[in-house]
Image (cartoon, rainbow, N blue to C red):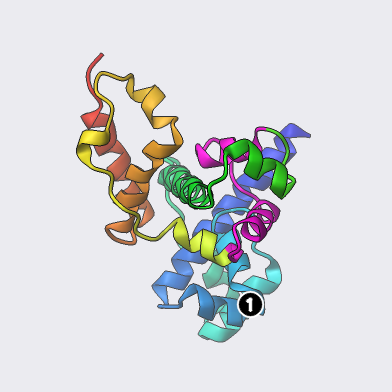
Amino acid sequence: MAATERARRTWRKIGGVRLRALRERYGLSAEQAATVLSVAEPEVRARELGLQEVTDEDVWRLAAHLGIPAAEVLRVPVPSREEPSDRSLTLRRKALGAALAVRREECGLSPETAEASAGLPEGRLLGVERGERAATLSDLEALADLYACSPEALLEAGEASGAVPDSAAAPQGEDAREFMHRPESNRYVLAAMALSRLDAEALSALEDVVELLRPAE
């Protein structure tokens, strides 16, 4: 059962990477893609993040709109087993988590209070903010209601530019792994992603650079 669920998650990720690659390849915005697929824009974002499955109907609608064979939709390149796709999804998940943490802090709420008010399971929000688990669409809808915004706004915040923290704010002498697990450290990732709409290959390279900059033990 667990293996089946893992396979489904992997397939959703692959579908999401393909959808975003195809959209960007043909110059479609998320809003335009939503119109083509007859869904709300947050659902397009959710598909691209691997939170929802890209359906056969999605494939046919895109193919018809772009005037290409459906098979070409399925042939859009996906990053290799070197797993830049997993790396890029991880960075996007961390960026979304950082944006959610910023929004919560702006509302003056603690993780525990926000979690309880949104009706989320105990510990879930903190895991999402730390980038340790993916936010589901229902999570985003509940948090959007609490934060008085839309799920779309939360998803866009994960890709938008945030204030880059002063370099002096980074703790000195702290273990790098512990630092990267703190919600506030995710803003560094968010700021880096916002420099440009980095593709999977560039995000993979960025992670390698971060590894090189990690202080030697």
- The amino acid type, in three-letter code, at marker 1 is Leu
Residue indicated by mark 1: 37
Is residue 124 or residue 134 the one in the foreground? 124
The total number of labels drawn is 1
- 211 sits left or right of 105 in the view: left
Is residue 135 or residue 47 the one in the foreground? 135
Residue 110 covered by magenta stretch: no
Q: Position of residue 190 (x, y in %)?
A: 37, 49
Q: Could you tell me which residue is drawn at 32 percent across and 43 percent down? A: 188
Residue 188 lies, with reference to residue 176, above or below; the image says below
Local packing at callout 1 (Cα closer than 10 Å; few below 14, some 14-19, many 20+) is many
Label 1 SS = helix
Quadrant position of residue 121: top right
Q: Could you tell me which residue is drawn at 62 percent across and 72 percent down? A: 59
Residue 55 lies, with reference to residue 61, above or below; the image says above
| Residue ranking furthest to the front | 108
Q: Could you tell me which residue is drawn at 31 percent across and 53 percent down? A: 163
Q: Position of residue 179 (x, y in %)?
A: 37, 27
**Is residue 18 something one can see in this rendering?**
no
Question: Quadrant location of the C terminus?
Answer: top left
Question: Quadrant location of the N terminus?
Answer: top right
Q: Position of residue 122 (x, y in %)?
A: 70, 34
Q: Could you tell me which residue is drawn at 50 percent across and 57 percent down? A: 17
**Is residue 92 something one can see in this rendering?**
yes
| Residue ranking furthest to the right | 1
| Residue ranking furthest to the top | 217
Quadrant position of residue 54: bottom right
- 175 sits left or right of 55 in the view: left
The magenta span reads 123-151
Is residue 211 or residue 4 the one in the foreground? 211
Q: Position of residue 186 (x, y in %)?
A: 40, 41
